[in-house]
Image (tube, coloured by chain):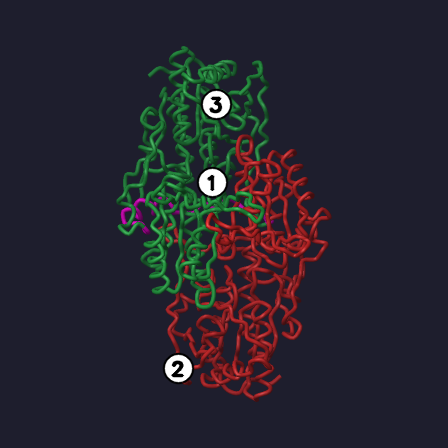
Chain colours: A red, B green
Amino acid sequence: MAKPAGKKNAFYAQSGGVTAVINASACGVIEAARQHRDRIGKVYAGRNGIIGALTEDLIDTSKESARAIAALRHTPSGAFGSCRYKMKSLEANRREYERLIEVFEAHNIGYFFYNGGGDSADTCLKVSQLSRATGYPIQAIHVPKTVDNDLPITDNCPGFGSVAKYIAVSTREASFDVASMAKTSTKIFVLEVMGRHAGWIAAAGGMAATADCDLPIVILFPEVVFNERHFLATVKRKVKEYGYCSIVVSEGVHDKSGKFLADQGLKDAFGHAQLGGVAPVIANLIRDQLGYKYHWAVADYLQRAARHIASKSDVEQAYATGQAAVQMALAGKNSVMPTVKRTSNRPYRWTIGEARLARVANVEKMMPKSFITKDGFGITQRCRTYLEPLIAGEDYPPYGRDGMPKYVQLRNVAVPKKLVDFKL
Amino acid sequence: MAKPAGKKNAFYAQSGGVTAVINASACGVIEAARQHRDRIGKVYAGRNGIIGALTEDLIDTSKESARAIAALRHTPSGAFGSCRYKMKSLEANRREYERLIEVFEAHNIGYFFYNGGGDSADTCLKVSQLSRATGYPIQAIHVPKTVDNDLPITDNCPGFGSVAKYIAVSTREASFDVASMAKTSTKIFVLEVMGRHAGWIAAAGGMAATADCDLPIVILFPEVVFNERHFLATVKRKVKEYGYCSIVVSEGVHDKSGKFLADQGLKDAFGHAQLGGVAPVIANLIRDQLGYKYHWAVADYLQRAARHIASKSDVEQAYATGQAAVQMALAGKNSVMPTVKRTSNRPYRWTIGEARLARVANVEKMMPKSFITKDGFGITQRCRTYLEPLIAGEDYPPYGRDGMPKYVQLRNVAVPKKLVDFKL
């Protein structure tokens, strides 16, 4: 593997939905790069993800203090801005890829660190292919990030463990609450969680109940076709046994025709279509069919932004994969992604592995069938064994005297432009 | 003030919606009582609140270990069960009050500790009045609890500070998230919070933005009549300035006719009435009128059960008011409620005061007008000065190696019944 010629700058960008720990990966990349100033010049971040590269809107991270960069480790969201912008195939829009190379060349960028999910792994792969085709040397390294936990090869994805911890803790807390109220009032609590295609986050709700904390939890997975009769009978049985029941429902739950339950064709008094969530749909169904009083919550962004209850292993792995990406670049690697390799469950041990991007791009890892109980409403011991270390440990952010977490807002100083404007 | 004759047992019950710290008050009551075994016999808890007293369904808390009782301090919800059961007036249902006295007499109960909001302060007052009328001596002490922060005289209510911290932290986190996404995707985040009559909880969302953390937050208070035009113009201006905007909306927001915005007469495809929240109503309005992409969340029980991010001052005050209730009882007091008295803002200092129940019952403390900015969408410096110490400090529960908070589930052993059944 050839080393890049001379001292090159690096480019780093955040892609897609952000997480509680994607900035910990940014911190890992930037701190590792700063430790190798002899080999890596500046780290330029794309303002609003890859759009920042295309429009030559680069942020000079060297303008940020060591303290500000260190604070990224405990700051949720994407500090440089992210974007939802899927680059087309090389054939369909070669111009955009060529523009990336132009921008990299203009700013002497030799390392491309792209922090995202499956789509961005694909972009990363294409950049490295074009680099080979055009002869301009770019090492493209993908840093894994997704709350959906759906990247292949890696044991888990940075970002997921913290959402999982938030959902597990919140489900336990709300279940305690509804248990207190059930005698005369609320008997059902419904929590809607993210995960349109894969039920990893919903599964985390099942972790609320453990051998030493008995709680009635019913999970609705996107992997299991919704069966109204079966569902209602299960809820009724739980209420009979416990007096109450908590339901964790994935936003992606659908019926056998594939129609999302959230899509109920709601109209307001004026006949305008209204978008609700799936939680109120489930709650209304229970009210109508079983007559129980209910409460429902939709966690939405709260779940993926909840740095205040991040998982320690998640924060460590997010940082480590960012750091490893730089080490891989320095080792001359290209078109790869650092992965988390689990080497032991108890005690939990992991190391950093490496995956070829060609094997990562456009492959979605679904939840194994063996993780869902036969009735379709719970998680198996195998699933618990998998999830437990991912939510283990706390990593609290520092708080001010005002009671608020000290999250950093960077200065995000722009790098002077060298090229003509580019229309997206 | 006369001391109760001989050694009497105590009764403790939890009333109404539970909180992250009501069990800390229970812990304060029980631990203080255990320190005075010479004067107080057993503490009996009402199973499911006052219903437990009426139906003679008492829990013998002496069966719980010191460790289990200590764990109540960090366990959210109502460990003995709560209830929504408003006792009628003495005139309308004297029979129920007399039944309470019968049960107290049968179990040699001389102390009545009732942990709740305004309604239960009223019940507590009536019990003490009936005690006087019937000649059976009961000292009725009210322990304040409400997330709504609407009890008079006390500077604040145990339960509120922790919800406020949760909402402030969550609003900050979600605002960071939407800021990252705003360039190409979500520009609006709407968070629905509790507080049907008073905007205290909504106000806490304003604490997300501080002098050292600039965020665009628009608050919709139940105290301010919803003005659609004014609201949309404000949101549009914030998006123009910041690129995005967070909206914290109280469930009690209503128009000038008094109609709740949440009540939009939603019907599903079959014409069935559906209950949604106010958050999707606001989100849909913004989509239709301004065209911005949005996300919305409804925190519901998550906010009041979130012991994992409880405020330290809240936990301390919840415990202290429970403890003080016992001390007041031992000092021969009757028909009173321990209060929190603020003696200094910076540094925050507080002591326990005392209020006559006659001055507490059925009085709702609203948010002062001076706490809301002139435009109706924000909080003033006075409001910040008031709220800041209430959300200050963290008081994390212990976690297991499984990554989950160790909340206690009590054994809740029943006290043998001595009376005939009583129909509610």
Spot occupied by residue A5 in the image (x, y as percentages of width and height): 53, 87
Badge 1 crowding class, 10 Å Cα cut-off, few under 14, some 14 to 19, many 20 or more, is many
Q: Which sits earlier in the primary sequence, circle 3 or circle 1?
A: 3
Give neighbour class at mark 2: few <14, some 14-19, many 20+ (Cα, 10 Å): some
Q: Position of residue B403 (x, y in %)?
A: 57, 50
Pointer 3 chain: B
- Say above or below: A85 vs B292: below
Which of the 4 image quadrants contains residue A44?
A: bottom left
Residue at screen point 58% across, 70% down: A119
Same-subunit check for callouts 1 and 2: no
Q: Quick check: B409 above or below B397?
A: above
In reply to whether residue B1 is colored magenta, the answer given is: no
Place of residue B69 in the rendered image (x, y in percent of width and height, measured from the top left): 52, 33
Q: Tell if the residue under mark 3 belongs to the same chain as the one under mark 1.
A: yes
Residue at 67% x, 58% y: name it: A367
Q: Helix, strand, or loop for circle 2? A: loop
Q: Which residues are magenta?
A: B377-402
Badge 3 vs badge 2, beta-carbon distance below 8 Å: no
Q: Kindly identify which residue carries mark 2.
A: A417
Q: CA distance from mark 3 to mark 2?
A: 74 Å
Horizontally, residue A45 falls left or right of residue A290, namely: left
C-alpha span from label 3 to label 1: 22 Å
- What residue did someone put label 3 on? B11
Residue type, label 1: Ala
What's the residue type where badge 3 is placed? Phe
How far across and how far down the image is residue A131, in percent? 57, 84
Which is more toward the observer, A390 or A289? A289
Residue A321 visible in the current orientation: yes
In the displayed orientation, state which residue is furthest to the top: B135
